């Protein structure tokens, strides 16, 4: 109880809406649903929050922010948790001086774990009843999600927006048995807030008969945490379900990923470095991959294999468990049937080939036998920093760095060469050396809305960009390319355009993966 009184005492001294953006090192978890609210038959629903500090030696200061529902005030406070200790905060929403409901955003510069339970006080005869609500990372947010297995006398649903800007969302409720659409609802979730739709079936489809199995499709303009609680009509007990990514909504459409790598003609020529690192501890070649649910995944080589981390906003990345395999500098082919083929260089300089592995989800990979590509006779046996792009005729073009030392004799030394595949990267044919200038390395090619192609590359201490009408020859590359960012202690650019128009370049540094945002997008 001392912790709760402390929280209540400091709440009035803090301004919850004016906190700075979280530090990169912060641990952030969200309890999607919490309450201090009256219910039917005189019940009072409250949320009990449990926190634990796993550190054996350091205390953890955990900031608790209420993301309120529309029309309700927000609040925030902090609690200090001793090493290897836990605290339980009864009626956390009420202790913050708030009422109604919302989500709880928990953050700390130290790792911590959290859980919660929302329940009615009950009676001495029947005890309490309610639902356990987990604390989930921000990477669980989706732009396209599914809630399924919903059955019960009553189903409530909710959306949580951790971003600053309002997000529009659509909920479609389905009869999971027949697939029939029972109702649709358009919602707007204001920045740093949440909403709840009570009794989903009656709210969206009041004339529909009672169903035993429901599903809900969620689509949003930016990532949201989406949840539902089926409630038993007799006991009043319930369960908590979090939306899972609806990968099929996008993955079933060929080329769903193309817009992420297509730039407006006047944009992407000037960048500003963003503070901090997106991923620390790896200095390898970054590759940024959009996922069908609207998130992005960053891949970068580590000492034990290819590492990955996932993000809902392109800035804060949550590391994925384990490694993806032995891959290093990866090129990514988006397969028409869904999933990915990754290609990477294997072997020493002078005798390198590209190998490959496939994955349905970007996490679990199966290595393919044999070799995918062997450098051409003028490449001096080198095929470093590969990158691929799909051409307008459905062929794929591979760009790679070859002939570091000018011993191949087929063109300018240490530049970008190309190869073509007609079978989604299984086999490749070397093209004549592309007309890129000397020391044009670390290639990353994107399409431009006018049908041309833009090559981003490193030239000495600068990231530069050059254009090509066909994606093969870049006569303005090398020293003649247009400088887009200082590249001292930076290498291997990877450019992507987010659905909201933000253009970002990720790059390697000696300490990890950094990023810069385009300043010429009008945002």
Image (cartoon, grey):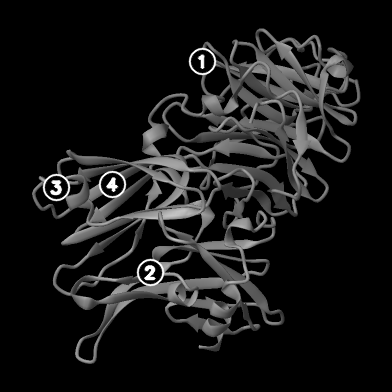
Q: To which residue does mark 3 refer?
A: 206
User: Please, what secondary structure does the residue beneath circle 2 have?
Assistant: strand
Q: Are marks 4 and 3 in contact (CB under 8 Å)?
A: no
Direction from residue 124 to residue 347 in the image, left or right: right
Distance Cα–Cα, label 3 vs label 2:
26 Å
Is residue 201 depicted above or below 249 in this figure?
below
Distance Cα–Cα, label 2 vs label 4:
23 Å
User: Please, what secondary structure does the residue beneath circle 3 have?
Assistant: loop
Q: Position of residue 364 (x, y in %)?
A: 51, 47
| Crowding near the residue tagged with mark 3, few <14, some 14–19, many ≥20 C-alpha atoms within 10 Å | few
- Foreground: disc 1 or disc 4: 4
Q: To which residue does mark 4 refer?
A: 216
Q: To which residue does mark 1 refer?
A: 394
Distance Cα–Cα, label 4 vs label 3:
16 Å
Q: To which residue does mark 2 refer?
A: 35
- Foreground: disc 1 or disc 2: 2
Q: Position of residue 182 (x, y in %)?
A: 18, 41
Disc with the residue nearer the chain's start (1 vs 3): 3
Q: Quadrant of residue 370?
A: top right
Disc with the residue nearer the chain's start (2 vs 4): 2
Q: Quadrant of residue 46?
A: bottom left
Q: Are marks 1 and 4 in contact (CB under 8 Å)?
A: no
Residue at 78% of width from left, 17% of height from top?
377
Direction from residue 252 to residue 237 in the image, left or right: left
Q: Position of residue 210 (x, y in %)?
A: 10, 53
Relative to the observer, which residue lies in front, 334 or 380? Answer: 334
Is residue 498 depicted above or below 63 in this figure?
above
- Foreground: disc 1 or disc 3: 3
Distance Cα–Cα, label 1 vs label 4:
35 Å
Is residue 406 depicted above or below 23 in this figure?
above
Q: Position of residue 422 (x, y in %)?
A: 53, 16
């Amino acid at each position: 109880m001392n912790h709760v009184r402390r929280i209540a005492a400091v709440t009035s001294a803090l301004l919850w809406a004016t906190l700075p953006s979280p530090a990169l090192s912060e641990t952030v978890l969200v309890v999607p649903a919490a309450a201090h609210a009256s219910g039917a038959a005189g019940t009072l629903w409250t949320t009990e929050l449990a926190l634990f500090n796993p550190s054996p030696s350091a205390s953890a200061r955990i900031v608790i922010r209420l993301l309120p529902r529309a029309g309700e005030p927000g609040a925030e406070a902090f609690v200090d948790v001793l090493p290897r200790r836990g605290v339980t905060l009864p009626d956390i929403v009420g202790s913050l001086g708030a009422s109604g409901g919302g989500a709880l955003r928990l953050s700390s510069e130290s790792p911590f774990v959290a859980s919660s339970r929302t329940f009615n006080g009950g009676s001495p005869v029947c005890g309490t009843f309610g639902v356990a609500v987990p604390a989930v990372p921000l990477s669980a947010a989706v732009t396209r999600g599914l809630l399924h297995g919903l059955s019960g006398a009553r189903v409530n649903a909710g959306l949580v927006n951790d971003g600053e800007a309002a997000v529009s969302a659509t909920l479609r409720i389905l009869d999971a048995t027949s697939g029939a659409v029972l109702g649709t609802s358009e919602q707007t979730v204001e920045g740093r807030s949440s909403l709840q739709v009570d009794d989903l079936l009656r709210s969206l489809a009041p004339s529909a008969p009672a169903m035993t199995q429901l599903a809900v499709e969620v689509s949003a303009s930016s990532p949201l945490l989406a949840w539902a609680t089926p409630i038993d009509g007799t006991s009043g007990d319930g369960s908590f379900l979090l939306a899972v990514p609806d990968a099929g909504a996008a993955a079933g459409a060929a080329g769903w990923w193309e817009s992420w790598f297509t730039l407006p003609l006047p944009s992407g020529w000037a960048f500003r470095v963003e503070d901090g690192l997106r991923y620390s501890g790896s200095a390898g070649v970054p590759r940024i991959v959009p996922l069908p649910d609207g998130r992005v995944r960053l891949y970068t080589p580590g000492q034990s294999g290819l590492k990955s981390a996932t993000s809902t906003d392109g800035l804060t990345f949550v590391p994925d468990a384990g490694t993806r395999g032995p891959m290093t500098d990866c090129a990514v082919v988006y397969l028409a049937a869904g999933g990915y083929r990754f290609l990477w260089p294997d072997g020493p300089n002078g005798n390198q080939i590209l190998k490959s592995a496939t994955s349905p989800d970007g996490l679990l990979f199966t290595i393919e036998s044999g070799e995918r590509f062997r450098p051409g006779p003028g490449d001096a046996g080198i095929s470093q920093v590969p990158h691929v792009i799909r051409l307008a005729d459905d062929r794929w073009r591979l760009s790679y760095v070859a002939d570091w030392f000018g011993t191949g004799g087929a063109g300018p030394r240490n530049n970008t060469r190309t190869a073509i595949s007609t079978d989604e990267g299984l086999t490749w044919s070397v093209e004549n050396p592309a007309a890129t200038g000397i020391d044009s390395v670390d290639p990353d090619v994107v399409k431009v809305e006018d049908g041309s192609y833009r090559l981003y590359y490193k030239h000495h201490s600068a990231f530069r960009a050059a254009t090509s009408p066909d994606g093969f020859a870049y006569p303005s590359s090398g020293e003649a390319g247009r400088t887009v960012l200082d590249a001292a202690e930076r290498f291997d650019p990877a450019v992507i355009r987010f659905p909201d128009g933000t253009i970002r370049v990720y790059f390697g540094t000696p300490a990890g993966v950094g990023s810069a945002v385009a300043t010429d997008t009008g945002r």
